Amino acid sequence: MTARIERLLFARRPLVLAAFALVTLAMGWLATGLKVDAGFTKLVPVEHEYMRTFLEYRDEFGGADRVLIAVMARDGDMFTPGFFAALRKVTDAMFFLPGVDRTQVYSLLTPNVRFIEVVEDGVAAGNVLPADFEPTEAGFARVRENAVKAGIVGRLVANDFTGALVAAKLQEFHPNTGERLDYLEVARELERIRREAGAGGDVDVHVDLHVIGFAKMVGDIADGAVRVMAFFGIAFLVTALFVYAYTRSVRLTVPPLACSLVAVVWQIGGLTGLGFGVDPMSILVPFLVFAIGVSHGVQMVSSVRAEAAGGASGLEAARASVRRLLLPGAVALASDSVGFVTISLIEVQVIKEIAITASLGVAAIILTNLALLPVLLSYFEADDAERRRARERDDLLRPLWSRVARLAHRGPAAAVIGVSVALLGAGAYLAPEVRVGDEHRGVPELRTDSVYNLDSAVITDRFDVGVDVLTVIAETVEEGCIDYEVMRTLDDFEWHVRNVEGVQSVVGLAGVARGINAMWNEGSLKWRTLPRNRYMLVQSVSPVPTGSGLLNLDCSVMPVSIFTADHKAGTIERVVGAVKAFNAGNANERIAFRLASGNVGVMAATNEEVEASQFPILAYVYAAVIVLCLLSFRSVSATVCIVVPLAIVSLLAYALMALLEIGLKVSTLPVVALGVGIGVDYGIYIYGRLRTHLAEGLDFAAAYERTLATTGAGVVLTGLTLAAGVATWIVAPLQFQADMGTVLTFMFLVNMVGAVVLLPALGAWLVGREKGMRVPGSPDR
């Protein structure tokens, strides 16, 4: 097969180059149609139990697509004509936001925000903002009094009366067009509202706007993802410098870079051709594909250069390199694919799209690096100066490789293994500290000092609510809201979760009904309870409209909104655990509590999916890598030498995440799996050359020294190019990109060190050492 592929590539080289050029032009044309495709349901496990509840009741009670705009007075309180003019402008703008559900827009100024009070004649109700409101001192005093009566202080009005909220819920599809809502358009409109709010017209306005919500978060992530494209240029330049420093030849530097760019073009064109867009979460995949392409291309360049330095012509050198690297290169790229394919088993659409995007890139690399690149290099003819530079570099590195090769003797090897065991112990101690979910306040995908997270901090500080809400769906019998036993269980549930650490406030029908019952009894706190009499219970519940989100038309569903201080992993675990504990101990069969809606409910579902997937995903990756190694080398000892360093580095990667407080979530879960799939390349290339020298009759230490002399520099450069491709992410504007860059850079570099240092140490004890002894997995001589 190798011989056939070799003849196919080199028999008609111009035809091969022309075919690649035509396909690249076609893919480039398709790539011009690439669009950013962001969606709410793409980021969540829609098949999870909580998400089924969320989707079932989303149309009736809204989902997690909430938008909050806090209008805050810069000086003094909110009771000024300028502030109310700005609040009116923001409220009106919110009604015309693309995709907004206009029945679910709430503000101090909207008619659906009302109060109820006890008067001499019984109970009176009205809008918080009276129809005859005038922006006078008396008018403001009246609004303030109504806000207190309505119980919206802390919810729609700041606790210190320095600002007010405008809240709205978005629909998944645009009501006018029927198409999926464009969250980027919504984010742009929200920024327009922020800019225009300060233009007060005839009234001086001194307000600040703070905007949070899923659509705004997606917009900020997309903006940061677009800005990160500039880092691609930096990564390209750094990678080019590494390759040039290794080859000392422009003619050998350009082909691997060009072939990797071709692979990226094919990847993007194929993605567009299949009807996919690029999600802000997957926009970094082309970076990774480029780095993988260059790293594998370096191996081909290294081989051609070595053959040319020995006097071979360009065509002979390329043919020999294809014969030598086709199998290990294919196996290494197959292991890369394994990492991407296994993460597609996670039931989150955006991760599946990352897997598809990356798999297309790896498929392109197989063709560009193992077919196009050797054909291009076959036109390279080394001159005497280049052969001299190659020999000088080899002479310069020979003492270094000689010292490293000492690790292939049993004495130094034992010391290396001892250090590795110590590192394994440290990793095993720290790795369990990694939390599933977020470790910090604010949106973890963005930097802590981002505008969005600063806005979120202001809203959380001034109000009792924010976007962090977990909605539990209480399902009961029809007219359950006028059944005392049902309502008492609901009241007990509200009290139970209200006392959980991390819960700011709880809003449910039982608590509201208690307050209304007190109002019917002169506001006496003694009557702030649920009446046992059915008719009095009807009187306490009937003023609550279905539009409040506290009940449905037949009172068979009563959501309870639990507002949390943050969405850290620990907070979510405590609240979800409390709900499950109450439900397990609930003796009332007429009511049950289902998790969960709201953004915290979505995060809870995602965290549970991530926790359930992390170990199976790693198991699948390692199983596939082990099978590939066994099939390729037909040796258990070779497989152990390659896989053990990978396992230690995986554990150390978890330890690093624990030390840096990087939680396991949708953006970081694939990283360790990808690090394994790509990190195994070093061991495959080293052992692929090592077994050739062992088959020549050399003992293990001598064979390894010869391996380093021919492959060592290429392997080190592979690690550096991979690391350079992702290290620029560390300073990216998005936090999840920085987290991914940190972990991948660590894994690529430490996997390279493990392959160069630990692999020979293990081989010294596991692989035959006697000269002339045939090594399992080596080809027949």
Image: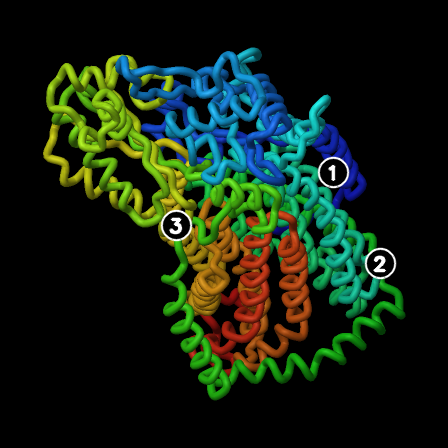
Residue 576, horizontal then vertical, whole percent = 29, 43
Which residue is painted at 38% across and 38% down in the image? 563
Q: Residues within 10 Å of mark 2 (few under 14, many from 20)?
A: few
Label 3 sits on a secondary structure element that is: helix
Q: Residues within 10 Å of mark 3 (few under 14, many from 20)?
A: some
Quadrant assignment, res 240:
bottom right
Measure the C-alpha gap from mark 1 to mark 3. Answer: 49 Å
Measure the C-alpha gap from mark 1 to mark 2. Answer: 22 Å
Which residue is painted at 55% across and 49% down in the image? 736
Name the residue tied to disc 2: 250
Whether tag 2 and tag 3 are in contact, CB under 8 A, the answer is no
Sequence-wise, the earlier of marks 1 and 2 is 1
Q: Amino acid at mark 1?
A: Phe
Choose mark 1 or mark 3, whichever is in front.
3
Name the residue tied to disc 1: 20
Which residue is painted at 49% across and 27% down in the image? 141
Sequence-wise, the earlier of marks 1 and 3 is 1
329 lies above or below 520:
below
Measure the C-alpha gap from mark 2 to mark 3. Answer: 51 Å
Q: Amino acid at mark 3?
A: Ala
Sequence-wise, the earlier of marks 2 and 3 is 2
- The answer to whether residue 592 shows anywhere in this view is no
- The answer to whether residue 537 shows anywhere in this view is yes
Please state if 516 lies on the left or on the right of 690 as rendered: left
120 lies above or below 65:
above
Q: Residues within 10 Å of mark 1 (few under 14, many from 20)?
A: some
Please state if 449 lies on the left or on the right of 161 as rendered: right
| Residue nearest the observer in this picture, 702 or 361 | 361
Label 1 sits on a secondary structure element that is: helix
Q: Which mark, by number, is residue 569?
A: 3
